[in-house]
Amino acid sequence: MLLNKKNFLKITVLLLISISFFLGYFFRENAVGGGKEFYTLSWPIIQSLKEDFLFTINNFYLFKDATWPFSNIINAYLNPFSDDITNFQLSNTIISFFIFLIFAIILKRVFLHVKFIDILLTSSVIIILPFFRTSAFWGKNENYGWLFLMLALYFFFEIRKNITKIPTTKDIINVMLFCFTSACALYARQALVFLPISYLFYLFFNKANNKIIIVSIISFFIFAMPGILLILTWGGLYESTNREGAFYGSWLHHKYIIKNIPILLSFLGFYLLPILVIDFMNSGLKNFSKKYLKNFALAFLVFVFLMQTNGLNYLGEYTLGGGALLKLNYLIHKNNFLLLLTFSSIGFAILMKFFREDRNNIIILMPMLIIYTFPKLLYQEYLEPLILLMFFLALKTDLHDSYFRKISFSNFILITYFIIFLTGSIWFKHFAFDTFEKWLNFVSF
């Protein structure tokens, strides 16, 4: 009877989360404020592709979109509802809901010992995240990248089981499917180029069977052909006509790496904080302190020193980018960044734990961390839900054991935390600063 009551409660929570997702669509939730870009970016591109594919590709600069049109091509030619905005946005919402279900299926394949209802609750966090929801409701393209990333990480999970042995036919198929899905992820979101890089490093550092390496390289080359043709057509990685230097120079450059480190670490701390809370509850204060306190204190002291010596003054100059924590810091005190730097220190402490636990975590994460510090402005949407997907599907860490040890409690912490984040995002964008001009007036005060 007690078990039935627990399952009933879990099913009820899952249904409420699912209902909230579709209510978000019907109430035109725009929790991160970027949904309406759909009308000036995605929708015109989709319609132009349907009318004249070659013209759209050859004149892509006219649409002022700095991404590749892969997801738009999928929607233009494979989505039967792409003739009407309302139907298209609803179809995108439904597709995004199925992405959550696919995430659950993959999680179950990775964590076989966990009951599926608990896995569903864990994976349901993705449809609570504000950026995922906004992309779903407004017909934007980002969620296709997360879908292909999930699939690629699953095939990577299968590949590394027997990476040094002579591969079977199934192993070769998994390698080819990984290369295909990671290529699709890259085409959908170009920053996901880190995944093939991390994968190849992983193969070499773990002395993978030569056949796996050869098949991987050949497969990557084949699946790179559409991208190579696009680059040759455009004369660069992006269609740069009338936008000289938009790709590497004014927007992406290695000179931005240092200044983006505190913000990137704050994102890691922000998304993994509930995991840290769960580990604290399971480990106790003494063991928890041994694992994290030293690195947290080191990072915090460095950041405070930089703040006191004006090395972080640039953090007070953002009107765009920087993430929710920086905006909250502005609401508290614009020129004091202790909240942001606290989360940055948490992120550093967790990152160091990952690195200590398994050298492969370094191989997997370092290309990602470097690539994501290249933009002039680091937006939180770039890493949501990337950090959670990498944590659950790519890394080897005892935090998985900690999370699934008391799964009901862990799901409660995780879901509650991100519901609070979603609620705050809705309040911020729909009520407190419902126009960008209001936010500019506030930060300029």
Image (cartoon, helix red, strand yellow):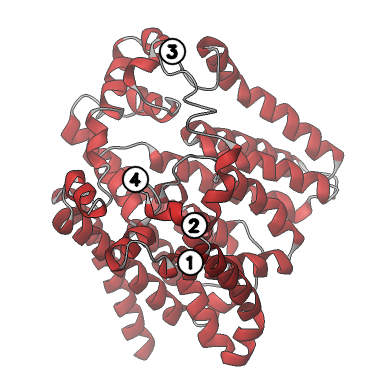
Image height check: is 260 above or below 210?
Answer: below
Q: Label 4, on which residue?
A: 320
Marker disc for residue 241:
3
Marker disc for residue 312:
2
Task: Tell me the element at label 4.
Answer: loop
Task: Tell me the element at label 2.
Answer: loop
Q: Residue at x 24, y 30 (%)?
A: 81
Cα–Cα gap, marks 4 and 1: 18 Å
Question: In this orientation, does residue 165 appear?
Answer: yes
Q: Residue at x 16, y 54 (%)?
A: 430
Cα–Cα gap, marks 2 and 1: 10 Å
Of the residues under marks 4 and 3, which one precedes in the sequence? 3
Of the residues under marks 2 and 1, which one precedes in the sequence? 2
Across and down, in percent, residue 137 comes to: 25, 45
Whether label 2 touches label 1, CB < 8 Å: yes
Given this view, does label 2 or label 3 mark the residue nearer the observer? 2
Of the residues under marks 2 and 3, which one precedes in the sequence? 3
Given this view, does label 3 or label 1 mark the residue nearer the observer? 1
Q: Around disc 2, counting alpha carbons within 10 Å, would you say few (fewer than 14), some (14 to 19), or many (20 or more)?
A: some
Cα–Cα gap, marks 4 and 3: 25 Å
